[in-house]
Image (cartoon, grey):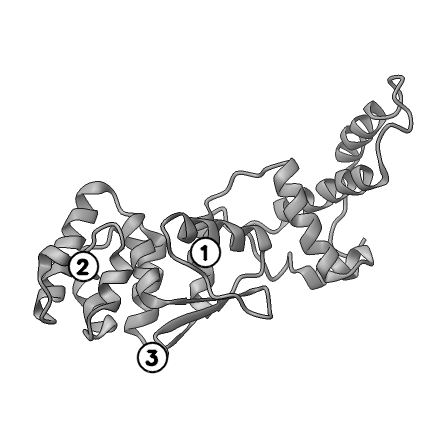
Amino acid sequence: MKYVSFEDQDKIRLFDEIASHFYNSNFGMMSKADIELMMFRFYIEKLISENMNADGTIDYKKCSDYRISQDLGITQQKVRNLKVKNQLINPVKYDWKKAFATLITHARYDSQTGKVVMNIPDPNLFIEIQNFLEERGDYVEKQLNGKILQIRVQYFVELVVELEPENKRKEIIKELKKHFKTAGKEDTLFDEKHIAKSLLETSESITFVVANICSIISPENVLGMALMKLLLTQ
């Protein structure tokens, strides 16, 4: 193998798991697809454990679809399909918000279109982000390249606010209402459940709005900190 090697103790443990599917009066019961998924799980768990950053996030450069496809001799699309299926069958708990924040470093904010565009290398992370937004009635603009996430920056701000604790969220919303009123809108019409929608109804500069709520964002809100840095350093 090019990127993954198993210690002897790992080999013993994994063989015991394989044997349990064949030597307990159940030989041949597993389908080819099940065997492939099991072997992929062994591989991806080892790969991730060996390429974990100090903060617990994955080094996606070393776990890319390309590297895995070269290692296993399969297409990148099959790698992505196996990643999604493995997460459904053998879910791995991880902080998707922190993982998302680490990728914002490479994001691009287009002030002309008002959209944040970034590459999301992990299909499971993309699904988590999309689901979070869709549950709130927001949406992700589909791209031909399934790794590209493109959303209006107002939806991004809403996501950041949603991740704040209740007291901080109220403080930020109070500040946003001030800008809403400054833009000639009645603050009573500000929709707290659909912040992005309300922000889109004003012509107020989103970077100006973000600059004014920057000091309120909790330091623990890694996604918020990352977005502030992206918008305010453009």
Q: CA distance from mark 1 to mark 2?
A: 21 Å
> What residue does disc 2 label?
215
Seen at 46% across and 53% down, the residue is 129
| Quadrant (top left/top right/bottom left/bottom right) for the C terminus | bottom left
Give the SS element for disc 1.
helix
Question: How far separated are the C-alphas under marks 3 and 2?
Answer: 22 Å
Does any portion of residue 220 appear in the rendered image?
Answer: no
Which residue appears at 72% of the width and 61% of the height?
76
Q: Is residue 17 above or below residue 188?
A: above
Residue 197 horizontal/vertical position (percent): 27, 61
The nearer-to-camera label among 3 and 2 is: 3
Q: Amino acid at mark 3?
A: Ser
Pick the residue in front: 30 or 5. 30
Circle 3 crowding by C-alpha within 10 Å: few under 14, some 14–19, many from 20: some
Above or below: residue 37 compared with residue 225: above
> Can I make out residue 20 in this image?
yes
Q: Specify which label sits upstream in the sequence, 3 or 2.
A: 3
Relative horizontal placement of residue 122, taking residue 187 as reference (left or right): right
Of mark 1 and mark 2, the one earlier in the sequence is 1
Q: Are marks 1 and 2 in contact (CB under 8 Å)?
A: no
Residue 151: name its quadrant.
bottom left
Camera-nearest label, 1 or 2: 1
Q: What kind of element bears circle 2?
A: loop
Seen as rendered, the residue at the extreme bottom is 112
Q: Name the residue carrying label 3.
A: 111
Crowding at dot 1, Cα within 10 Å, few <14 / some 14-19 / many 20+, comes out as some
Image coords of residue 94 (percent x, y): 50, 42
Closer to viewer: mark 3 or mark 1: 3
- Residue holding disc 1: 100
Amino acid type at mark 2: Ser
